[in-house]
Image (cartoon, rainbow, N blue to C red):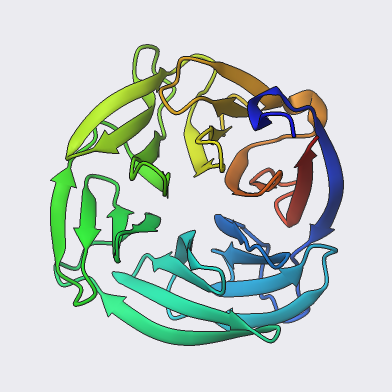
Amino acid sequence: MRPLCECDVKEVVKFSIKCPSDGGSCYAAGIVYLPDDHIVVVDYNNNKIKLFTTSGKCLDEMKVPGKPFDMCCVDDDTVAAAIVNSEIHIIKVNHAKLTLSSKIKLSNGAHPRGITYSNEAFTVSTPTDVYRVSKNGVPNTIVSPPSRCLHLACDPRTGHIYGSQSTSVAGDVAVYRLSDGKLTSISKVGLLKDAFGVDVDRDGNVYVCGWASNNVVQMSGDGTNARELLTSSDGVDRPIAISVCGNKFVVTNQSSQNRSEVRVFELY
């Protein structure tokens, strides 16, 4: 197989996450592509977690008591969602059903946005800080990034955590790597503007949604090599969330025209 950093990209399918029971327009702020070809989506506007097949069939939906934002994979059949009301919800995905497994209440009342999981604990971001959260809900501050971080991802091979920053100011850090409590800039504002969704593939490449730059960028783990996978000419319009699984990835957008869509792409 070709390295994923050299592969071309094609769209496989796109589908709507709009459900008859939704009270308003959808906003897919977080997404996880599971290895069994199920896709779990956060619908921020409707306070829901939704489960779909890769062909777009809705299998289940779960109402949550707050605004869900980012989401991460815990294991092959478990996801976790950052709920803005100071909670992390851990959800099992079995037999085409979503089941709430447990909740973790952040003891300091912080409102999490980004979330990722590694080494038996969660790392979450708020508009001002990044915390390591144990299962008892006690958050320990790791760093306070200079700009708002809304999405996080972890490379399980290295333990590095990647955070995107919502800023379009020239010279600001767009994407940083967090390791041993230290932040390292791997991408400045330029190719990416207002970075949102972020994920890491099996080769250690980092994928980032540029909300204001209307693109999806793939870069090496140290940021030295970067290329645009998708641009506005591919229909990318305010991309928000991304999740990579094998040689496929899913992207959501926030634009009024396609905010209810999930698009599935393949690297080949």
- Answer whether residue 215 is visible to the viewer in this image: no
- Answer whether residue 182 is visible to the viewer in this image: yes
The picture places residue 132, in percent across and down from the top left corner, at 22, 57
Name the residue nearer the viewer: 200 or 216: 200
Name the residue nearer the viewer: 105 or 78: 78
Image quarter of the C terminus = top right
| Image position of 28 (left or right of 106) | right
Count numbered badges in the picture: 0
The picture places residue 247, in percent across and down from the top left corner, at 71, 44
Name the residue nearer the viewer: 104 or 113: 104
| Image position of 51 (left or right of 47) | right
| Image position of 127 (left or right of 69) | left
Res 7 → quadrant: top right
Q: Given the current orientation, which residue lies at the most extreme front position?
A: 1
The picture places residue 89, in percent across and down from the top left corner, at 41, 76
The picture places residue 29, in percent across and down from the top left corner, at 55, 55
Image quarter of the N terminus = top right
In the image, is residue 60 above or below residue 251? below
> Residue at the spot x=69%, y=75% of the render?
22
> Residue at the spot x=38%, y=56% of the render?
115
